[in-house]
Structure formats: C-alpha cells, structure tokens
Amino acid sequence: MIRFNVAIKARSRFGSLKPCEITMHYVYVLKSNKDGNFYVGCTGNLRKRLSDHSDGNVRSTRYRIPFELVYYEASRNNNDALHREKYLKTTYGKRYLRNRLKGDIPR
C-alpha cells in the first residue's frame, strides 16, 4: 500500500490537525521487451509489484523479462481496481489500451 499525506487535514477529538491517509490500489500494464506482449495486473503497492516482476519473482511473467511500465490507473477502492483489471483483459479493454497508447505501441 502506498500512503499519501494530503493537504486536507482532519481534526481529531482534541482539536489538533493530523494528515489523512489514503490507500490507493493500482491497475497496471507492463510491456515485455522480450516478446512485445502486455501483462495487466492489480496491486496495492505498485513499486513493490514492479520490482517483483523485474526480479523474476512472478511465475507468470518470469520468462518474459525485462518489462516496461506503459500504463497505470489509481483507485481508492480495491473492488473498482479489480473490476477495471478484468475489463482491461477483455477484447474491448485491449482495444481501449491500443487506442490509449497509440504513440507508445509500434504497429
């Protein structure tokens, strides 16, 4: 989980201000430099997950390294992130990514 200190501060019972913590959930798209294919995943800690992929600690992507992060989205709700991940793995989601990343993907 990546936590952000936001400019909005919440008052505690005793009147002092403390920073709010927001937990973000990420949907990410990696492009394999080896075979040119994409991998779509979801995580609560994007930096750690990218490190896991790069180090070969993820079984499904172990033989496709090195990877490049080409796209990600952040959400405050885990269910929304999981739903978005499922969508991006469908035919329509892949079409959306191709259109969204037109300049990054060679034909």
Image: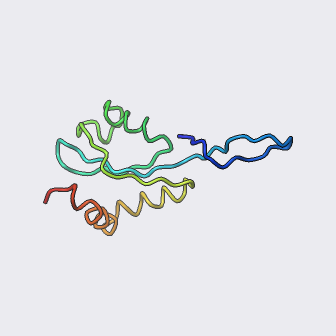
The residue located at (75%, 42%) in the rendering is 17
Q: x, y percentage for residue 103?
A: 21, 59
Task: Tell which of 40 and 21 is nearer to you.
Answer: 21
Tag count: 0
The residue located at (58%, 46%) in the rendering is 23
For residue 48, what is the image quadrant? Answer: top left
User: Seen from this angle, which residue lies furthest top?
Assistant: 55
Q: How is the image coloured?
A: rainbow
Q: x, y percentage for residue 56?
A: 31, 32
Quadrant where the C terminus sits is bottom left
The residue located at (32%, 30%) in the rendering is 55
Asked if residue 66 lies left or right of residue 53, the reply is left
Q: Is residue 45 above or below residue 77?
A: above
Quadrant where the N terminus sits is top right
Task: Tell which of 13 and 43 is nearer to you.
Answer: 13
The residue located at (33%, 51%) in the rendering is 29
Asked if residue 50 lies left or right of residue 80, the reply is left
User: Seen from this angle, which residue lies furthest right?
Assistant: 14
Asked if residue 49 lies left or right of residue 103, the reply is right
Task: Tell which of 35 and 18 is nearer to you.
Answer: 18
User: Seen from this angle, which residue lies furthest left?
Assistant: 107
Q: x, y percentage for residue 63?
A: 23, 37
User: Seen from this angle, which residue lies furthest bottom?
Assistant: 92
